[in-house]
Amino acid sequence: MSIAEFPNNTGRSRNAPAEFERTPPQDVIAEQSVLGGMLLSKDAISDVVEILRERDFYRPAHELIYDAIVDLYGRGEPADPVTVASELTKRGDLVRAGGAPYLHTLISSVPTAANAGYYAKIIRERAIMRRLVEA
């Protein structure tokens, strides 16, 4: 072991970057609840698109799902697990988004679609905090 690899008194290697010490501000449960609500309700989609952008999501898979939902909604097409899975398949992103079963998991994890706008505000706040930390 070289001296550079030897742990210092913090328990991490001297070469370990400081940014890996903490998880960036995020709320994956709120992200899942927003997406689940959007998959259940057009009203939830209209509420959420006023608050969130793709880049606000912490998980890249959630960005992909959000983009597919918003595109379908913008074309006047239904946005449910079947149509979103089809859209993600066309884009070659279904596996990166977690697969079709994950879309159904999102629906089963949402307490209620009616609160999607509130969950979106939580995500937006965490995204702003992440950007401030990164600056």
Image (cartoon, rainbow, N blue to C red):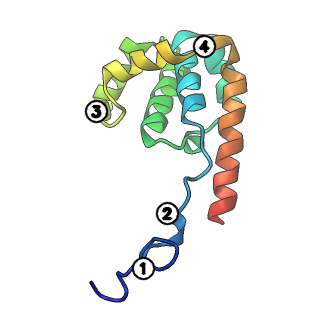
Q: Is residue 45 above or below residue 130?
A: above
For label 4, the residue is: 111
Sequence-wise, which precedes: disc 2 or disc 3?
2
For label 2, the residue is: 20
Residue 83 bears which disc, if any?
none
Secondary-structure class at tag 3? loop
In the image, taking residue 123 as reference, residue 92 lies left or right, namely left
Does the rendering let one see residue 52? yes
Sequence-wise, which precedes: disc 4 or disc 3?
3
For label 3, the residue is: 95
Residue at image location 54% in from the left, 35% down from the top: 28
Give the x, y percent position of residue 59.
48, 41
For badge 3, the amino acid type reads Val
For badge 4, the amino acid type reads Pro
Tell me the CA gap for discs 1 and 2. Answer: 11 Å
Give the x, y percent position of residue 97.
37, 33
Tell me the CA gap for discs 1 and 3. Answer: 34 Å
Quadrant that contains the N terminus? bottom left
For label 1, the residue is: 15
For badge 2, the amino acid type reads Phe
Sequence-wise, which precedes: disc 1 or disc 3?
1
Q: Is residue 34 above or below residue 92?
A: above
Quadrant that contains the C terminus? bottom right
Secondary-structure class at tag 4? loop
